[in-house]
Amino acid sequence: MFRIIKKSLATGVVTGQFPAAKALSEPVSREAIDKAKPFRRSLTIREVDTGSCNACEMEMNALANPVYDVERFGVEIAASPRHTDALVVTGPVTVNMERPLKDVYKQTADPKLVIALGDCAIHCGVFKGSYAVTGPVERHIPVDVRIAGCPPRPTEILAVLEALRSAATESEK
Amino acid sequence: MPDGQTAVARVQEAFPQAVMQVGSVQGVPMLRLHKQDVPAVARYIHTDPQVLGSLSLLWAVDHRPREARYEICYLFTLAERKDWLLLSVDLAGDEREFASITPVVHAAKWYEREIRDLFGLIPVGHPDMRRLVRHEHWPKGSHPLKKDFVWDQLLERVQGEYAYRKMHGEGVFEIPVGPIHAGIIEAGHFRLSVAGEPILQLEVRHFWKHRGVEKLFEQQRLTEAVPLAERVSGDTSVGHSVAYCQAVETLLGMTVPPRARYLRSLFLELERLHNHIGDVGAICNDTAYALAHAHCGRMKEQLMQLNDRLTGSRFLRGVNMVGGVSRDLSGVQLSQIDAELHAIEQEFAGIEKILFANASLTERLESTGVLSEGIAWDHAVMGVVGRASGIDRDLRRDRPFAAYHECQPTVAVYRYGDVRARMRVRLDEVHDSIRLIHALHRQLPMGPLTTQSVEAPTPGQWAISAVEGWRGEILYVVMAAEEGRIHRCKVRDPSFVHWPAIQWAALGNIVPDFPLINKSFNLSYAGNDL
């Protein structure tokens, strides 16, 4: 017990110990920000992997670690598409994942946002052209926000989520 | 116990009629066999106490347009001295059938189904002829790795349904999980048959993420495909790129300069570190022990930020290139690594004390998800999972590559095969990795980072390379085509071997322990599906 308390005291607060994000390659559009308004300042996310190499998933997972602690901004990861406000889609959409992706989109209640995370989701990346790939994501479902990078750093994902919440913050002032 | 050559002699003695020709590739003895004799020879190699070979890789090659034949190759690792032995068999002309070795060598099961899907060759006698890679909506006759299959064609969609193995009985019901999971996990499907809580049967159905990686390699040039190799499995970017580069370097007759070899080892260990520490945290998280998860998550993040500062990539991408490495580390950077790792090791040791003092954690981990040594051997399991089940294999020691000749790892082996053993292997390897990185720094030679190609490979020439990634053995077979292009690139992530084994580890465990068992294996879906 004392060992645990000692460890926690010695560690202190690590939240926020990360380098600042670089400027976004593509700013979040006004439409997307307006679309995010009904969610106020909380945003519940469902992540859908449609054939990524797992690096994007690792960075999404990193958002939940104590350093980024995305929950302090009201961002939560939902276990079901029915509980979600925003779908985060990674990967180039393989032929085998095309159906599940469309199903998930249908199962998500309106209003909803779709965020294409990573180069593969945006333009299929190194997998472009393959017989097994039918993407990019916007070929199958409407995409509102794009986060480029292979993979995008957690700080860059965080900056986009911040921008999406900005509309709600403005209207509350 | 025999080395490769003695094993060859034994096989020849036992099967004088079967062997057509004895050759060697990169010093690995290779036996050309008559088609009908393969199962008998494979059985002999696999079971004879004087040989004891475990199937490491099984792959096929379509030799068209140069020659109208398919070739199927079997790579065995001999138990005692870890020597390699290759078997090969030809299917000439219109032949489409080959004898399955799955009835005698269990580890061949998925490989042969994969060959059937990707090449349209039929493993006669295989006990499970369902599709593996090509899901049921793929049209008949679409076999992507045949040379007459156009790589960027659009596939039509047909109707079809996968037949899961059914289990019947009073109170037996099925739990389907995936392909889209509750957490932030890759796509895959698990079908659990349960009666109450205990799992009676687990069936893994994967390949949702099949992106056609091996076909994409064939569209690339030998020297330019490293970015694709890095994206086979994102968490093993260094492992896969080193394995790919080594195979190509063998083809091009390159000798990688010592400094580049050392840096490769160093990057491999950095990759091992952040993944292992993350896994320890994730295992604890699946027992709802959030404290350890938070601490491990923090340390993992610290390591990934270190990677970013050193190389400009949190996943160490872009450091490897054919012929060496593209990024040097300065003395200052190396001292930074030393200082940071020293601090992390102290902290990690503190967390370990907390973990071992926690009885409820031990209670969940001990005797959960046991993979016995026998089943592990049957499935040719290796890597972290194998070493937790008493399979003493580590390529860094057995077939040293990069700088592991000069800096040898201490191999951690446990025998219980449960979740706790898999965690202990990782804990030990974290400390050993840090020790190795310090040693690599101390011995790091000066000199150039890259080398030039001295020879062009003749079309049809191939090379095999093996790297111990943080999960286990990563194997690449690269065959050259005309004008520096790739004819065939076989990629084998350890996950491909371990997924069938996890079906056995879950048996008899309760449903809530399945995520924990899965986490303790922590296999790649992307590296498996390709």
Image (cartoon, rainbow, N blue to C red):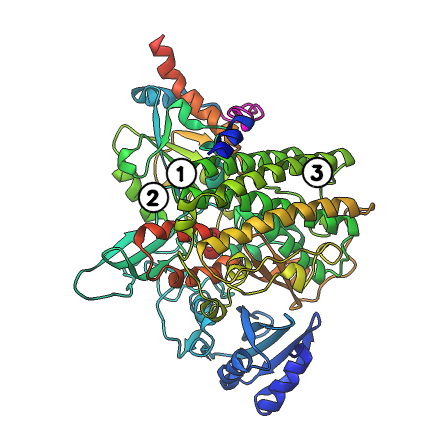
Q: Residues within 10 Å of mark 2 (few under 14, many from 20)?
A: many
SS class, disc 3: helix
Q: Mark 3, mark 2: which one is toward the viewer?
A: 3
Three-letter residue code for mark 2: Leu
Magenta segment boundaries in residue numbering: A11-26
Q: Mark 1, mark 3: which one is toward the viewer?
A: 3
- Residue nearer the viewer, B173 or B230: B173
Residue under disc 2 on the same chain as residue under disc 1: yes
SS class, disc 2: helix
Q: Which residue is mark 1?
A: A89
Q: Is residue A122 above or below residue B419?
A: above
The single residue placed furthest to the front in the displayed view is: A2
Q: Chain of mark 1?
A: A
Q: Which residue is mark 3?
A: B338
Magenta stretch: dominant SS?
A: loop
Estimate the spatial distance between the alpha carbons at disc 3 and disc 2, rounded to whole Å. 45 Å
Three-letter residue code for mark 1: Val
Q: Which residue is mark 2?
A: A101
Could you tell whether B253 is left or right of B7 in the image? right
Residue under disc 3 on the same chain as residue under disc 2: no
SS class, disc 1: strand
Q: Residues within 10 Å of mark 3 (few under 14, many from 20)?
A: some
A25 magenta-colored: yes
Q: Residues within 10 Å of mark 1 (few under 14, many from 20)?
A: many
